[in-house]
């Protein structure tokens, strides 16, 4: 059974909710959709952060990245 919650919205959240409702979404659907999307965005952020950490820990990758950066810098036009 779905659970019901109560929430206090600040002006910004109230305005965002009104914008979602203006598309034809019910309040409940707008809030549910927003929560699911926010959670998915956090998961994507966590995955990306883990990938960045793995790349930063990869010494071979870091060496290659620095070599490419040096090569690109040597090709850069003066000025």
Image (cartoon, helix red, strand yellow):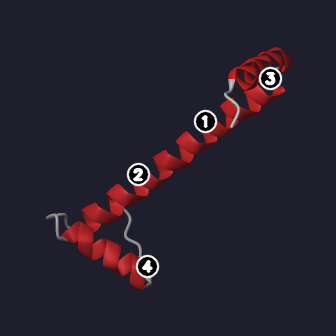
Q: Measuring from the top left, give residue 39's x and y in whole percent.
A: 49, 51
In the structure shown, which secondary structural element does the residue marked by tag 1 occupy?
Answer: helix
Name the outermost residue toward the front.
Answer: 79
Tag shown at residue 47 = 1
Does residue 34 sit above or below 22 in this rendering? above
- Please state if 3 lies on the left or on the right of 20 as rendered: right
Disc 2 or 1, which lies upstream in sequence?
Answer: 2
Tell me the mark number nearer the camera, choosing from 4 and 2: 2
Q: Rounded to the nearest whole Å, what is the CA distance between mark 3 and mark 2?
A: 37 Å
Report x, y in % for residue 69: 74, 24
Element on which disc 3 rests: helix
To which residue does mark 2 refer?
Answer: 37
Q: Identify the residue at horizontal 61%, vertical 36% (top origin).
A: 48
Question: What residue is pinned by disc 3?
Answer: 66
The alpha-carbon separation of the residues under discs 2 and 1 comes to: 15 Å
Q: Splitting the image into 4 quarters, where does residue 60 fall?
A: top right
Nearer the viewer's eye, disc 3 or disc 2? 3
Q: CA distance from mark 3 to mark 4?
A: 50 Å
Pointer 4 or 2: first along the chain = 4
Identify the residue shown where x is 33% and y is 56%.
Answer: 33
Residue 54 in picture, x, y percent from top left: 75, 27
Q: CA distance from mark 3 to mark 1?
A: 24 Å
């Amino acid at each position: 059974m779905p659970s019901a919650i109560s929430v206090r919205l600040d002006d910004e959240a109230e305005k965002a909710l009104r914008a979602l409702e203006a598309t034809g979404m019910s309040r409940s659907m707008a809030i549910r959709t927003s929560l699911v999307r926010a959670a998915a965005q956090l998961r994507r952020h966590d995955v990306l952060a883990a990938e960045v950490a793995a790349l930063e820990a990869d010494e071979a990758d870091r060496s290659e990245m620095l070599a490419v950066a040096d090569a690109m810098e040597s090709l850069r036009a003066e000025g």
